[in-house]
Amino acid sequence: MKDYHQALFPYAYNILGSAEDAKDAIQDVLSNYVAKPREEVENERNYLIRSVINHAINLRNRRKKVNLGEVWLPEPVATEAADTDINLKDIVSYSMLVLLEQLNPKERAVFILKEGFGYSHQEIAEVLSGTEELSRKLLSRAKNKLGAAREEVKVRRRERVPTETLEKYVNMIRGRDTSRLENMLAEDITFYADGGGKVNVVRKICTGAQEVADLLVYVFEKYEQSATIIATEVNYQPALLFFVKGRLLSCQVLGIEAASGRIFQINTVVDPAKLKNIAEQAKGKGTRL
């Protein structure tokens, strides 16, 4: 069943945005499947994919009620080096996962299956026990909600950023050079921070180059001056890991515009539960800045 754990991971993770929840969902489905009479299943792989997707949708429906009104960021997954326990090939980019938070669970599932996995509307209808017409409507509704932002934020695009660019960004923060830092940021940049209700954050949401630059410098002065900073890759995007006394304090994932090279989004995860896995994945990897 280990092969199924790997194959099913992207489906569950892309819908849930949490590696831990995805693994739990897969384990639930596989446990139920083992107890099921085999003659009731025509195609084992398709049955398990369908079961995991629908279980993940149900879990998201329950979680949405709990997290309503809060900033909720996905659990980051290191993609710089392969993890033998999970299949990284089909996971969605981090900025896209953040964008997908605007959708309800079924819209999200249809969008991911169509845009991320290349499913036909007929296949989606079979997975979700619906109709092709409903699949088309859900996809259209999802695209309308996401708007023009989905053109910049690709489902799965590896953003290759020179280490020198990240060094420049970090050095400007270290040097409190907010005016030059602003020039690296898009005018309409958005900053999100998620402490998971366990860690207080300075601001959950901040917009605009000047405001974000000031916030980055303030947070660095207050919390990160003694941090060891590691440049790595998270969900196919450049990211910075801030370690203090060997403990991962935060993970900062950067969204960078393809045309201008400016940072249009900064997602900072400080929730210890969401940092646990990536702290292990990042050991001995990345570049110290």
Image (cartoon, grey):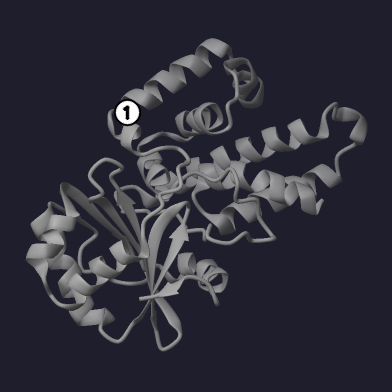
The part of the image, by quadrant, that contains residue 224 is bottom left
Image label count:
1
| Local secondary structure at mark 1 | helix
State which quadrant residue 200 falls in: bottom left
Counting from the top left corner in percent of width and height, residue 236 is at 47, 51
Residue 8, percent from left and from top: 68, 44
Q: Give the residue displayed 57% in from the left and 17% down from the top.
A: 121
In-image side of 186 versus 36 (left or right): left
Q: Amino acid at mark 1?
A: Lys
| Towards the viewer: 155 or 132 | 155
Q: Is residue 45 above or below residue 249?
A: above
Relative image position of residue 29 (x, y in whole percent): 72, 45
Visible in this render: residue 253?
yes
Give the left or right position of residue 77, taking residue 189 as reference.
Answer: right
Is 284 above or below relative to 138? below
Relative depth, front residue between 263 and 208: 263
The residue indicated by pointer 1 is: 145
Q: Is residue 10 left or right of residue 201?
A: right
Q: Is any part of residue 196 visible from this angle?
A: no
